[in-house]
Amino acid sequence: MPAAEIITIGTELLLGEIVDTNSHYLARCLRDLGIDLYRTTTVGDSPRRIAQAVQHSLERAEIVITTGGLGPTVDDPTRQAVALAAGVELEFRPELWEQVQARFRRFSRTPTENNRRQAYVPAGAIAVENPVGTAPAFIVELGGRSVISLPGVPREMEHLMEHAVIPYLRRRFDLNSVIKARILHTAGVGESQIDDRIGDLETLSNPTVGLAAHSGQVDVRITAKAGSKEEAEALIAGVEDELRQRLGDWVYGADQETLESAAMQAMQARSWRIAVLEAGLGGELIRRLAAKSFVPFLAGETLPGSPDPQELLALVQAYKEAHQAEVGLGAAISSSRERQQVYIALITPEGAQNFTRPYGGPPAYAPRWAAHHSLDILRAL
């Protein structure tokens, strides 16, 4: 089974001026094709450094995919860099120049002379027409290895990947397996506690099981490789059943399911509606509940200052009554030089409760952590 590496190109990526979403998309595509991704690298607009990155990737992987640097300007060096890595010259392709001109004509525009650069590709390369942009892509084959250079514009890159590159990879490498992944989300528990219960499963070779800790949440990833989607899903299902049995109520959902959805489902199951107050969370909890217009969520408001637990409980009671909600929830962050405390007040038809949760992580992550714990308390009702 071939392995792949991704190289994203652009000084703007290194400077943090734009966010790299291309690697995420390409990684998912490669995974679904059953191709192992070894490494992702970001390189600035230097032909020499790009060429070195390509050569190093070719030492480790059969497939190297680059994105970016195929525009018409001087600081679009990918064509030159890949030619340098392959030890060939650039050659002009009249048919590519016609494609570029045709693309401009569709918008009643005239290409400038520097657009001719986009009709150059490394000698012997397979040209890939770009029907949704002006930058043609290309593929350089070096023995049993392939360098695939795609535009950096996400819409163009995704179109070419789907319609040209994936069919090419299937033919070229006789791909007949897939990689599927399933992510279980947990809340209210730490990474070490989960590892203590499932450590033996983390040593499996297929499917593999891995942990990823986030602020207030730990994800458990199951990844399987098989000859078909159905076989991979069957492998995942067996391990998922075992994980759910061991982790129990710590698991609140999988894949795209969110903690706020689980919390609102718990409210809806009891026909309860909820009103929310928060202080010091920057609107994090209210935004998450309001984003999808959950039926049980009636209203939310941010409070100034940092109320203590009893003040928070009284404010929640008044706010709940004002909105005729069955449930009132309040979350507040109290900060000192030594530590932060999260206060959570919950009032339901079954009574009132105060919770105090000490938080010792980075202060910037405290709002998300507090929102997670508040939602976890709701979904456990």
Image (tube, rainbow, N blue to C red):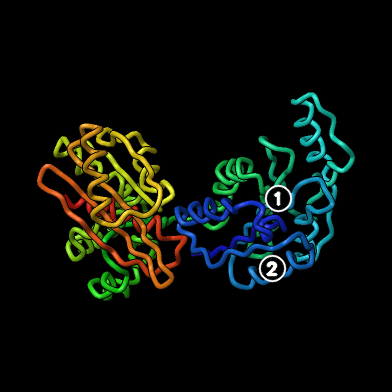
Across and down, in percent, residue 102 comes to 78, 30
Q: Secondary structure at mark 1?
A: strand
CA gap, disc 2 and disc 1: 18 Å
- Report if residue 245 is visible in the image: yes
Q: Secondary structure at mark 2?
A: helix
- Report if residue 222 is visible in the image: no
Q: Quadrant of residue 147?
A: bottom right
Q: Is residue 148 left or right of residue 347?
A: right
- Circle 1 residues within 10 Å: few <14, some 14–19, many ≥20: many
Across and down, in percent, residue 26 comes to 54, 53
Q: Quadrant of residue 306?
A: bottom left
Residue at x 36%, y 36% (from the top left corner): 292
Earlier-in-chain disc, 2 versus 1: 2
Q: Residue furthest right?
A: 113
Across and down, in percent, residue 309 comes to 26, 56
Residue at x 56%, y 55% (from the top left corner): 23
The relative height of residue 205 versus residue 372 in the rendered view (above or below) is: below
The relative height of residue 126 versus residue 86 in the rendered view (above or below) is: above
Q: Is residue 36 left or right of residue 154?
A: left
Q: Nearer the viewer, residue 288 or 118?
A: 288
Amino acid type at circle 1 is Phe
Q: Is residue 195 left or right of residue 213?
A: left
Residue 138's tag is 1
Residue at x 78%, y 36% (from the top left corner): 100
Residue located beneath label 2 in the image: 53
Q: Nearer the viewer, residue 253 or 339?
A: 339
- Circle 2 residues within 10 Å: few <14, some 14–19, many ≥20: many
Amino acid type at circle 2 is Ala
